[in-house]
Image (cartoon, grey):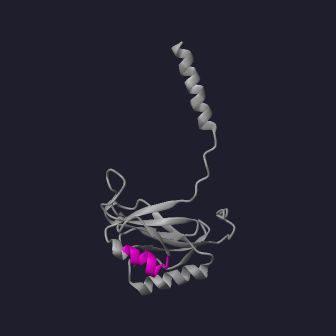
Amino acid sequence: AQAILDQEERIEFESRCRMSLPQLDGSITFIYAKDFEESCRFYGEILELEVAGSLGSDVKIFMLPGSYLGIVKQGISAAANPPRCASEAGDTMIVGLICKCTEDVDAHHRRLVDSGVGSVLSVPQRNDTFGLYNMLARDPNGYLVEVQSFLKPDFLKPLPSRM
């Protein structure tokens, strides 16, 4: 009798797993900032990302096309062991910012150089291996930031618009 119940439970579980998940409403990437104010300035004032909201005074969320970027003061986290910023933990991610054209990448490069905030690692250049035009920088907490445009404009499937 127990084997039949176990089999019925397994069949019910497998049936639930095959059901489609509800569509996600969006995405957010969180990065941790030892220098919270300077990071907020880098993404807000220098890169001109619009503030979408905040979670208290230690988390600021910026709008990206189709997603969000959350800047979290280091030491604050919903995780049991709060993550550290990239300058302490090493490269764990890249903040990729997509531009429509090479001229836009050049404009972001000029802005980053002129700002003196963070550090610019490379001039914009064509990268035929990956089919993009890009430049690299580091934000004030050491995160790698890649500003890029794809050489083939239709390379990525467009994000669905929300109505």
**Up-down: is 85 above or below 118?**
above
Residue 127 occupies which quadrant of the picture? bottom right
Residue 118: % across, % down: 38, 77
Q: Which residues are magenta?
A: 39-49
Residue at position x 62%, y 52% from top?
Answer: 23
What residue occupies the far top of the structure in this picture?
1
Residue at position x 35%, y 76% from top?
Answer: 38
Residue 39: % across, % down: 38, 73
Residue 113: % across, % down: 44, 84
**Up-down: is 79 above or below 7?**
below
Left or right: where does residue 28 sit relative to residue 81? Answer: right
Q: Is residue 121 visible?
A: no
Q: Is residue 132 visible?
A: yes
Residue at position x 55%, y 77% from top?
Answer: 125
Residue 60: % across, % down: 41, 69
Question: Was residue 86 drawn as part of the magenta stretch in this picture?
Answer: no
Left or right: where does residue 19 sit relative to residue 144? Answer: right
Q: Main secondary structure of the magenta part?
A: helix
Residue 26 occupies which quadrant of the picture? bottom right
Left or right: where does residue 147 sit relative to residue 37? Answer: right
Residue 103 occupies which quadrant of the picture? bottom right
Q: Which quadrant, please, contains the C terminus?
A: bottom right
